[in-house]
Amino acid sequence: MIPLRDTTPTRNYPVVNTAIIAINVAVYFIQLMQGPEINRFIYIYGLVPARYSIPQLAEYFTGGQQVFSLVSFMFLHGSFWHILGNMWSLYIFGDNVEDHLGPIRYALFYLLCGIASGLSHLILNLQSNLPTIGASGAIAGVMGAYFILHPRSKILTLIPIFFIPYFLNIPAFVFLGLWFLLQFINAAGSQGTAGGIAWWAHIGGFLCGMVFLKIFSAIPHTGMSRQMRQFTAKRKTARLQVIHPASSGADPHLYGLIKITPHEATIGTRKLVNIPLGFQKRLFNVKVPAGIQEGTVLRLRGLGQRLGTHQKGDLYLKVTIERDGVY
């Protein structure tokens, strides 16, 4: 299963998530420059459990080097496809988690998830002399947080079957639940590193991500974090909005919400509104006038349910203004 995108929009630009991706790419280019010294480079900056459990190996490294490797290993990658897969997953899931936590808390959250995943691998493979590298464990923590935050979000997923691509919208709790189950099956059926993959690091990262999310969510935003939100807040909501309108009994009218930002409320905007009704999907162009207020109801005549042969109800959209991108 290859995730292509999710359906949950963000209110802020993911500055930290983007920076993490950029750092990973920069470090990968540094790796490529190592030439014949690449194995030594990876052994020094990767996570090698035996370096911590075997005194004869530990004496070759300073305390600072040992601590630094618990962080540096998550920025190293073994191949182009390795970093591409990791960064793509981080791109899809990380922005929503940063949107919830804010940039400062998200940066700490990501690093702690990576460290926790590394410790999970280290504890269960104490005698291993093989370096473990990659952001997979930290990203697993991000996925664990996404699992808690947006379980009903849809993940557009590519499933190749006999070279035929199938595209499915899978609920996030199903996609991530299957992903976690596969990690556990692979870990239980191997020594934890079959195929060079640290399965227990993925499992540890995912579980710690769910726990850390609860802890970090309870920590209040700092003044610096709120100031950063002012710069990272998006000035516009998504151009396309999917609305699931409600109706009651024999009422022919439909009722829903349309989301805009304060900037859009001031200058006005246009939105494409997608309304799924049964097996049909109706798309409308909705104009939001300038100077509109919170709670204003837009009436779209004739876009409700059919009354009879020639009559239809109306669609009422209540305006919700998302302020400053802060939850």
Image (cartoon, rainbow, N blue to C red):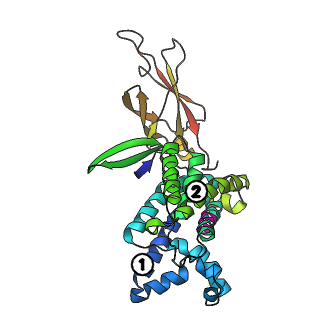
- Majority secondary structure of magenta residues: helix
Residue receiving disc 2: 206
Residue 146 relative to residue 67: left or right: left
Q: Quadrant of residue 262?
A: top right
Question: Percent from the top left, x then y, of residue 322?
Answer: 59, 43
Q: Is residue 116 above or below residue 49?
A: above
Mark 1 lies on a secondary structure that is helix
Question: Percent from the top left, x then y, of residue 230?
Answer: 61, 57
Question: Which of the two residues, 29 or 49, is positioned nearer the viewer here?
Answer: 49
Question: Percent from the top left, x then y, of residue 56?
Answer: 63, 88
Q: Is residue 208 magenta?
A: no
Residue receiving disc 1: 29
The mark that comes first in sequence, 1 or 2, is: 1
Residue range highlighted in magenta: 110-118
Three-letter amino acid code of the residue under disc 1: Phe
Q: Is residue 35 visible?
A: yes
Identified at 73% across, 52% down, the residue is 218
Q: Quadrant of residue 222?
A: bottom right
Identified at 51% across, 77% down, the residue is 130
CA distance separating discs 1 and 2: 28 Å
